[in-house]
Image (cartoon, coloured by chain):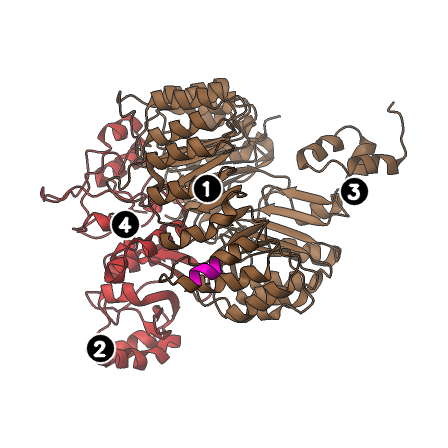
Chain colours: A brown, B red
Amino acid sequence: MMFSFPDEVLEHVFSFIQSDKDRNSVSMVCKSWYEIERWCRRKVFVGNCYSVSPRMVIRRFPEFRSIELKGKPHFADFNLVPDGWGGYVFPWIAEMAGAFPWLEEIKLKRMVVTDESLELIAKSFKNFKVLVLSSCEGFSTDGLAAIAASCKNLKELDLRDCEVDDLSGHWLSHFPDTVSLVSLNISCLGSDEVSFSALERLVGRCTNLRTLRLNRAVPLDKIANILRRAPHLVEFGTGTYAADLRPDVYSDLAGAFSSCKELKSLSGFWDLVPAYLPAIYPACSKLTSLNLSYATIQSPDLIKLLSQCPNLQRLLVLDYIEDSGLEALASTCKDLQELRVFPSDPFGAEPNVSLTERGLVAVSSGCPKLQSVLYFCRRMSNEALVTIAKNCPNFTRFRLCIIEPRTADYLTLEPLDVGFGAIVQYCKDLQRLSLSGLLTDRVFEYIGTYAKKLEMLSVAFAGDSDLGLHHVLSGCESLRKLEIRDCPFGDKALLANAAKLDTMRSLWMSSCAVSFGACKLLGQKMPRLNVEVIDERGPPDSRPESCPVDKLYIYRTVAGPRFDMPPFVWTMEDDPSLQLS
Amino acid sequence: MANVLGTEHDLNFKETELCLGLPGAGVGGGGNEVDSSPRTTGKRGFSETVDLKLNLQAKETGMDLNKNLDNGSKEKPVSAKDPAKPPAKAQVVGWPPVRSYRKNVMAGNKSTGEESEKASNAAFVKVSMDGAPYLRKVDLKMYKSYQELSDALAKMFSSFTMGNYGSQGMIDFMNESKLMDLLNSSDYVPSYEDKDGDWMLVGDVPWQMFVDSCKRLRIMKGSEAIGLAPRAMEKCKSRA
């Protein structure tokens, strides 16, 4: 029998355990720990909003203050999930509005948030402090106005990568005089959605403001005024960073940047004009994070800038940086942990910049702390990948996108199986991997054999047969999310590894070869899974059972099938008589 | 249900929903017809082309994958027979995996003036239908004519048909009685909001003009669209 501490002592101990994973482990130790833990969990994380119902969450955790929900599958970012699929937050808000007047934080990712939901939040939670909407859609500036007006204790309003309906720029004026924001991110708002004078006034009275990310509509000449009103900013995102070069504007700007002594992170820089870039130099030596992924400046200017930033840990940039810029990065930024290189011309038939595998090899060699990579390029070799793998055994995230599907090793014309095999073999802590290029079933054999800590895998245009999928499902012990498109994976591997799906958050397969019959079978046999067929051609039972479905989304759930689906989504039914034990 | 495979010129599939998602179909090796867009507009093209025959065979035999993989890049149903044009890249939906706000940002940055319009890679507009509980989005640049758009909308909103539009898909304003018939029916009629913020009937202007000026689409009951007709006619006259 466990030595019995008083509950309060255990509760106090548990209060130091913040991570969701650890909290879940704690709750499984014994019944009394489960009970104590559930009463003192303050932050709830639901990775798939359909895996559990709001009522179940509230019943189990009666005292939470913060909730984080994720909705649509990741491939929704690339328009693979048709609009109307789901991910509505309203039912959650409605349920919490009644039960939880003391809710303080809501964080949502890839969910549909209506103005109605925002208005309900504004009305229901008197101490509401933090709203983070990441890649959400469905709301307008009217909803934002409601939040601004009613949430008197609001500290954080972060709209990253959201799609907002522009109706009026004056929602900012709805903030009361007493509001004291710590963080405001409106970078996703379109033009005409922000009133500059309201913005300046707001910034002026939020003396605790530490994060401010403006949208593109804010012109360059407004930035100095704003910065001067917020000298303690730690994170700042500019608007359009372009204007005719005027010495007075320039010196104003440079002065403003030097007065912000705590700046660590910069972003924005739309339409960047190189002449104005040196204005940020005073801030560069302290910068740890720089997002230039909207700045179309060329390699020489980038090299000059990066040479000023020796403490950089995180860099997002366009492929204009080219191999030469990445080589410079490798020699000056020894603390670099995360690098993302985006394509400037993703749909162009020919390369428009000189960015190849060499750049990534250089960074892998020069930056010993590199852990997270997202790299778009047009050619790769097994040799380069092996070198990169050996240079960076500490990778946790490696996402490589070779732009043309099924591109072979450009030196040997072989598949890139060996290269990616090296990545999973050397990088023992790899949690996330995205594949591209020409790949056979062999790469999946490597992944199944070595990638024991892998939690998320993204696959496109790869593999030869069901064996590939089988390797992954049977070998990757830590796998939680698997997303696959345009691969010849069919029924066999999926059905043979059905039980694995109970241990994962979700599986997405589109343009593969899984038949409707197999989906039905899976739905019947696996009661704790929702097997959703997404098919805009019409009902799948209007075609032969052997016909492959267009898109398939399978996720585990304790909430049963959902009922908010559009006409082009079907959930396969459970059949109790057929269930696997 | 047969796969309705677009027009006679190009197989223009907006989304992968129109093909069986045969791996290997439509992607390898480029070499696809599209139109004569220069490289800067590269993206002009269709999402995936699928050989008609392959489709039907696959339906019958339940997917002969090896055959598809072998035939994949070679058997395109309609190829540009013009050897002078460089093979444009066939565009695949959702690939490369770049978020749409990144695509649009690039378009804005690409160049100035009129060229930037052509360089813009996508023209996503929201489509709402009266009575439908959700919005859809379409990329107008994926289509070449009103007919193609109409087919795509029909797939999305199965109770919608574009009714009595003329052969080009354009409204025949010369024939008022035909127009009034259309508007008096209980068929759905597509309307759109143009750059000036006015709501117009779809089909009142040539296709390209429509693509350039359309900001959003709304599919409404013919009887409700009656109010749009006079304005549409006025605009037409002022442009003529």
Disc 4 chain ID: B
Eye-nearest disc, 4 or 2: 2
Alpha-carbon neighbours of circle 3 within 10 Å: few (<14), some, or many (≥20)? some
Where residue B75 appears, as percent x and y from the top left, is 19, 35
Q: The numbered mark 1 sits on a residue in which chain?
A: A
Q: Which residues are magenta?
A: A249-253
In terms of sequence position, does the residue under pointer 4 or pointer 2 come before the other?
4
Q: Is residue A357 left or right of residue A25?
A: left
Whether residue B195 is situated above or below residue A106 in the rendered picture? below
Residue placed under numbered mark 4 in the picture: B4
Q: Are marks 2 and 1 in contact (CB under 8 Å)?
A: no
**Which residue does the numbered mark 1 point to in the structure image?**
A308
Q: Amino acid at mark 3?
A: Cys
Q: In the rendered structure, does residue A251 fall within the stretch colored magenta? A: yes
Q: Secondary structure at mark 1?
A: loop
| Residue type indicated by callout 2 | Arg
Of badges 4 and 3, nearer the viewer stands 3
Residue type indicated by callout 1: Gln
Do the residues under discs 3 and 1 have CB atoms within 8 angstroms?
A: no
Q: CA distance from mark 2 to mark 1?
A: 55 Å
Q: Residues within 10 Å of mark 2 (few under 14, many from 20)?
A: few
How crowded pointer 1 is (Cα within 10 Å; few <14, some 14-19, many 20+) is rated as many
